[in-house]
Image (spheres, rainbow, N blue to C red):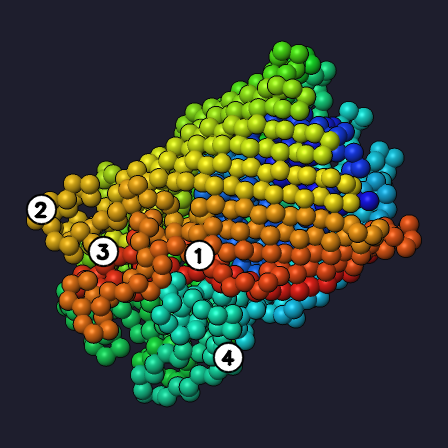
Amino acid sequence: MKKLILLCSTAVVMPTAAFAQSTGSVDFEKEVIVVTGTRTQDVGGVQTPDAPKAKAVVTQEMISRSGPGQTVLDTINIVPGVSFQNNDAYGNAGGTLTIRGFDSTRISYTLDGIQLNDSGNYNIYSNFSIDPELIEQVNVNLGSTDVDSPTASAVGGTINQRTRNPGKELGGRFSASLGQYDYRRFFGMIDTGELTSVGTRAFIAGSTSKYDNPFNNYGKMDRTQLNAKVYQPIGANGDFVSVAGRYNRDRNNFFGSVPLRLDREPNQGFPTSRDEREYDINYPCTVDAPQAGAADAANSCGTEFDRRYNPSNSWNFRGNSRFTLAEGLTLTVDPSFQYTKANGGGTDTAREYGYDLNPTGGRSNCSTTPESATVQCEYGYFGGDPYVGIDLNGDGDLLDTVTVLTPSQTRTRRYTVISGLRYEINDDHTVRATFTRDHANHRQTGQIGYVRDNGEPVDVFPVDDPILTADGAVVQKRDRQSYAILNQIAAEYRGEFLDNRLTLNVGARLPFFKRDLENFCATSSASGFVECSGQVASIDEDAVDLNSSWSPPQRRVFKYSKFLPNVGVVYDFTPQISGFVSYAKGLSVPSTDNLYNSFYFDRDEAAAKPKPETTDTIDGGVRYRSSKIQAQLSAWHTSFKNRIAEAYDAELDQRIFRNLGSVEKYGIDGSIAYQPIPQLTAYVFGSWNKSKIKNNLIVGEFGGITDCDNIPGTATDLDIARSCAFTKGNREAGSPKYTYGTSFSVEPVQGFSFGLTAKRTGPRYVYDNNQPVFFGDTTSPSVGNEVREIFPAKVPAYWLVNMDARLNMGAFAADLDKTYIQLNVYNLFDKLYAGGFGGFSNQPVSSSGFYSESSSSGIPFVQMGAPRTVSVTFNVGF
């Protein structure tokens, strides 16, 4: 009877299969470490592979034991070194991921070899994955990537999902899931079986899921997804062509995000009890009726953070193919196309009148002040608000401020092809060469739309029918277009020596990155803040002439390239013991936001030329395997150079990107799986990591401070506090110091299985300077304004325990072996814990000496951990 074996990177090997990213990598690798999720009666008959890198693979059996619809990032949370904080228990709302301390922007997330990371900012949106029932396996590369990977940022590892192939026989699977928070999910899949005499087969699948968010009286999660795949085998030597497609529609609300402070009422700070997790927002609500001839103020109805929609429409097509051209010579080609339309919601206050571009006139109110020599009223998005020159609320005047929908809209079109040639010189020596082309076009805009009287948006996509100014221009908060282009060549050699006891892998990739960016707005700050006319050239010219510090609309091209070698060795000391070591150099190109922020500076300034991040990673370990025990212990070290950090510049009063310099990172990962009897499997895992920032970070230049390691004696305490983030020698924020846990599975009687997984996630620093969150006046405190700690330096460690139980109908009738009822309980003991958050380098101090409370500058927001959530799934397979 099959059951989970949670073996992580040390465990069960399927000796005839290879698991990696692209078809070329799959074809090149003969074996890999597998967390199989499949228990056999004889563990001693399973081999451990000769893999030079630390890897782990989770297969469908384990994925299916997670909650219904759950993101695979939550499933791989048992892999040592992986830390994932899920935003909800059902997987639709995203989460926060780190691997060995690297955040998600530095981890490649792929599906059948194509990259799912945002091609501009490299973020991972875990809810963009395919339905978990369709995932054959998930491969995790810890700290490195394959040589043909189309990544611009994967210095911290790779996660690849591989879609299952259609079955050879007619079959299907249908499931219905019900759970807390009015959870309803339905999934269906049909395998056509072999449709032709040459073995053509296909599947088509679809799912819907809807539920309430667990914290307030408003938010909803709503997803619809369709998937299909056609597979055509060619000959008898493993050649094939396959085409797959996915369509996904999400209509989600934000929820559960609170500031990291303990001195506020519920929903204004992190809760101190389980009951405080739940809160109400102003819903339903209505707006006040506008009055003709009066300067009506904007209503607050619909402006709450939790009222924001996070809509997305996305689809992709993925091709995979393998062709034998001659004996020992194989060609693989993987083309793909992706399209995404999404925004992050949000509202703003629009002005029915114009904006005074002339700062020397005191920024006169254009609703009441006629134009003069010192007043120049124009329409557009200026000073963070839209000025439109039209009657927005229908009261017949142009005097009012009105709440409008103002999301940041993104449309992405991305074309990729990964191609490779492999030549098997003989049984012991194999080489391959690859070429990768990745071309992504991002159109990032910020059109505005109307909000109904009840606070609901008329259309969650204002881009479809935007509000125009009196001049007929499209008013928007940002307006830019960029191209992220990669051309990459790579080569790899694998050789086996000393009677196949020694395996050597040597490879290298040479990427050529091009970032072609055009900003149609003027840049008014180093944080990338923009002033947009709606592409009206005359207004842009006047705006820049009147505001000399603004950078005009323009285009810039950035190019990055670096030779990236990697080498790995595996040596089998005995049939039970082997060791491995590998080295890899990595490269992370600056994100689109970082590059656009540099537009503020003149082209010849250093700040206009952001440097790429680079890493040098060494990874090594030992493995032991026997008939009952599988174990691995590995250690790693990464030198991280030009680490980009987001910091608050007190002089500019803005958040900007800064080069934190060098960071040393190292750690230990390990796991042991033990199967004393076929009905019981126990597993323990753990990881510990350390990071050490090598430099202090300068965030301002007050009192003559230009170097935070050499502060002049004339500088005051306030100058120092506003100029320096003392990060040297400290640990990076946001990453847990350690993780460890255990899992066991038991089958007490045939047909009934029970599993429990418990993981403890260690404390995480809030800031890179490892200081607590403060409130108060540092210079002249008064009663109530004295400096006090409102949150500790670290988010506390926490336990997360999940349970699953399954009753398989195959125990009662052999032809029902694919039919079962499954119970899942997420966060079994209903622990209150801090989930994911984005840490800052430091908490800034204002010019008056106050610790900043602003969420945009000082105090991070944290996602509350999902509460205990129970669901039941009824699955029928045939």
Answer left or right for 862 relative to 369: right
* Amino acid bearing label 1: Pro
Q: Nearer the viewer, mark 4 or mark 1?
A: 1
Q: Is residue 112 left or right of residue 878?
A: left
Q: Residue at x 49, y 29 (%)?
A: 619
- Disc 2/disc 3 C-alpha distance (Å): 21 Å
Q: Which residue is mark 3?
A: 650
Q: Residues within 10 Å of mark 2 (few under 14, many from 20)?
A: few
Q: Is residue 859 in view? A: yes
Location of residue 284 in the rendering, given as x and y in whole percent from the top left corner: 51, 81
* Secondary-structure class at tag 2: loop
Q: Which residue is mark 1?
A: 796
Residue shown at the point (52%, 24%) measured from the top left: 581
On the image, the x and y values in percent for residue 17 come to 71, 30
- Label of residue 378 in the image: none
Circle 1/circle 2 CB separation < 8 Å:
no
Contact, CB < 8 Å: mark 1 with mark 3?
no
Residue at 71 percent across and 66 percent down: it is 178
